[in-house]
Amino acid sequence: MTFAPAPIIETDRLILRAPTAEDFEPWVEFASDAETMRHLGGAQPRSVAWRGLCSVVGAWSVRGFSMFSVIEKSSGRWVGRLGPWRPEGWPGTEVGWGLMRETWGKGYATEGAAACMDYVFDVLGWREAIHTIEPANVASQAVAKRLGSTLWGPVEMPAPYEDTKVEAWGQTREQWLARRAALGR
């Protein structure tokens, strides 16, 4: 099956586009930072970061969707990855996020994830979207709440994450569309 090229999605402050080879060095910086990766499986060496980038790039070919590279409009800098995610064995259709530590608190996760919620429901036709979040990750729980998602409960993750305690936060397409209409979007 052949899929359409990955779209480019723009928000007020971000550009979301498919990852490229040029994203590798900032991806390594992101993935090797222990604090950034505290709730994302832990800091990764360069070789594992490479496999992570290639998994995201490859999912565009295999699934027709994947996470986007997040580019900060004001600087043109790669600041993270977020978007639709559903590797084999995943507990559901996810809109996830992971951003460079220096961007935390700027609202980029909410801004980018909201654009991706529109994309997965309007373009991909998903019926629901989850966010897999560790119980201790209060910041990502706050993002999920700002998106209108609620706690659905614990989920089991596939290998090699099977020992990680994770909860699904989520909402249905109907809930997202009602929230979007209430916000006048």
Image (cartoon, helix red, strand yellow):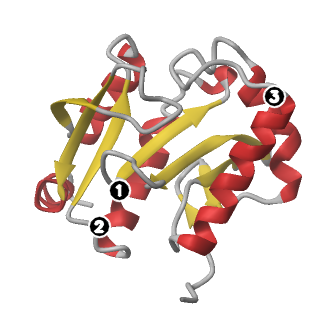
- Disc 1 is placed on an element classified as helix
- Disc 3 is placed on an element classified as helix
Mark before the other along the chain sequence, 3 or 1: 3
Q: To which quarter of the image does residue 15 belong?
A: bottom right
Q: Nearer the viewer, mark 3 or mark 1?
A: 3
Contact between marks 2 and 1 (CB within 8 A): the answer is: yes
User: Dividing the image into 4 quarters, which one contains the C terminus?
Assistant: bottom left
User: Dividing the image into 4 quarters, which one contains the N terminus?
Assistant: bottom right
Q: Label 2 sits on what residue type?
A: Phe
Q: Label 1 sits on what residue type?
A: Met
Give the number of the disc on residue 101.
none
Tell me the residue that label 3 is attached to. 29
Q: Is residue 180 above or below residue 31?
A: below
Mark before the other along the chain sequence, 2 or 3: 3
Q: Label 3 sits on what residue type?
A: Glu
- Disc 2 is placed on an element classified as helix
Q: Residue at x 40, y 66 (%)?
A: 119
